[in-house]
Image (tube, rainbow, N blue to C red):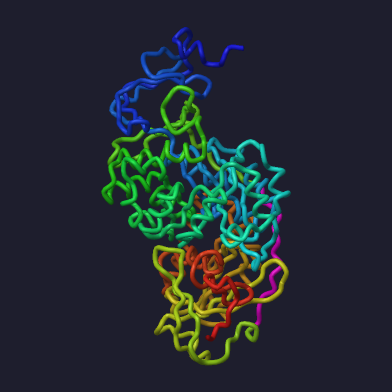
Amino acid sequence: MTLPGLAAARGLEPADAVFTGAEVFNPFSSTFECADFAVKDGYIIGLGDYEGKKEHDLSGTYVVPGLIDAHVHIESSLLAPAEYARVVLTHGTTTVIADPHEIANVCGVAGIEYMLAGGARTPLDILIMLPSCVPATPHDMGGARLTAADLARFRGRERVIGLAEVMNVPGVLTGDEDLRAKMDLFEVIDGHAPSLSGKDLNAYIHAGVQSDHESTTLSEALEKLLRGMYVMIREGSTEQNLRDLLPLVNRCTAPRCCFATDDRHAGTLVRDGHIDDCIRKATTYGLEVELALRMATLSAAERFRLHDRGAIAPGRLGDFCVIDDPDRFCVLRTFKRGVEVIDRGYRPPEVPVAPMHARVPVQDEIRITGAGEARVIGVVPGHITTRDLRCPVDAAAIPDTGRDILKAVVTDRYRGRGSGVGLVHGLGLQEGAIAGSVSHDSHNIVAVGVDDRDIIRAIAEVVRLGGGLVAVSGNEVTTLPLECAGLMSARPYDEVLRRLAAVEAHAGELGAIENPFMYLSFLALTVIPELRVTERGVFDVGAFSDVPLFC
């Protein structure tokens, strides 16, 4: 049987399309070269002088292979998959490696199926790494528990390529049997190991974990790279590690480094961009543009063994973007399988069935008592890590807006089992309250406020909506409904942007810091140091246990 496109590659028949006149980035040498190239049946058949049924004159521009996001939770954009794709395709991204563990924590297997179905509705290649830890830890329980048998049914499915971030580090190190069974299902395994070092890092890698995106310091990232891991340099809406980690990258290490956005709100995507934003920032911080482009294309493709993309080369997908200038990196056009991506507009997504059985707390349930040294969650700007602050606190004096110490409440959304209470510093609210159903990883309802009544009102509004982001003060209530499992909106991205801007503006009027809902969403994330709050109360990540509010 003759290989499709072989005759066209030999020049014996015309290609579907030829592209001429551009400076083409070659990631194998990290150089640009003036080259024409041809596409047949969605694949590049060769570079050189070809004839085609269509000819695209790209003179005066530069061509870069389609950009690849090495690790992303689409749910964090607040957009359904097809709407997310509409945005990132315009920024030159043609492939994302998505971990659907957010919706899997809410809906289980049905959530993974939902993301696969949504990905099939768009030209963007949404490749799935299956969530390894649902729930995130043995202490947590969201809407589902996924076993190795649950994941095994997806092995071999189209667009399923491996196992996503293995965040249960203690389970890896102690040989948890179910986790080991999950890891044995796949050859490609991503990690999640903040601050892991020394012999425990050796053991984690020895167990089969190949990459990490949680490094926040250069020394941490360098140790992981020197032990053989791929390092994903993350730049999300609040997880901004690019500037600190960029000195890691040079011509020797670039093949082991790639970009990841992890969690980016729709507003950040539209305003700042996607992987193109990472490239622009990297060059601004002093990295050679060619190395940034290498990271954004071939490095990511090779990490995931995607040998059909990442370069403008024979046998690779005709995925590329056309830019004006490498240093400015403004994407002019995006091509997928050799065809220009044209925005076909909004199509309403399916809305998954998701649990919302929260019991709205009354004031007595969220009241704190006592005085003394308290554990206060310290928000760290630009990071999702927190600090374990020990502050003298009199419960009768909370909220303490002068010291920016406020009450944080997490309400069980699944079984109506009540609410946990903690204290947080760094969100800045001076009045009112904010709440949301986006609360990594279990996605219970999380709220922070200056007044108990406003906290309860905000939680009640999230419940009424079936999920969403809410800001309340006085008689004013501003909302962004998240109809898709309480995580994503079913609305067009421009409407989501307007409503997100409105609820963030309202929070800003209350004194909140920038991106308050993103920071809010991480207050309950029990796999990132140091201190968190759950529906049970305060959680110490280092001790890996629930702890009292007062020491």
Q: Is residue 328 left or right of residue 469?
A: left
- Residue 111 placement (x, y as % from top left): 66, 51
Q: Residue at x 54, y 37 (%)?
A: 125
215 or 449, nearer to the observer: 215
> Does 161 sit above or below residue 261?
above
Residue 66: quarter of image: top left
Regarding residue 469, the answer to whether it shows in the image is: yes
**Residue stretch rendered in magenta on the structure:** 350-362
Q: Residue at x 37, y 38 (%)?
A: 294
Q: Is residue 16 left or right of residue 151?
A: left
> Does 258 sit above or below residue 25?
below
Residue 360 is a magenta residue: yes
Q: Is residue 179 left or right of residue 60?
A: right
- Residue 308 placement (x, y as % from top left): 50, 30
- Residue 267 placement (x, y as % from top left): 45, 55
- Residue 518 placement (x, y as % from top left): 48, 63
Magenta stretch: dominant SS? loop
- Badge count: 0
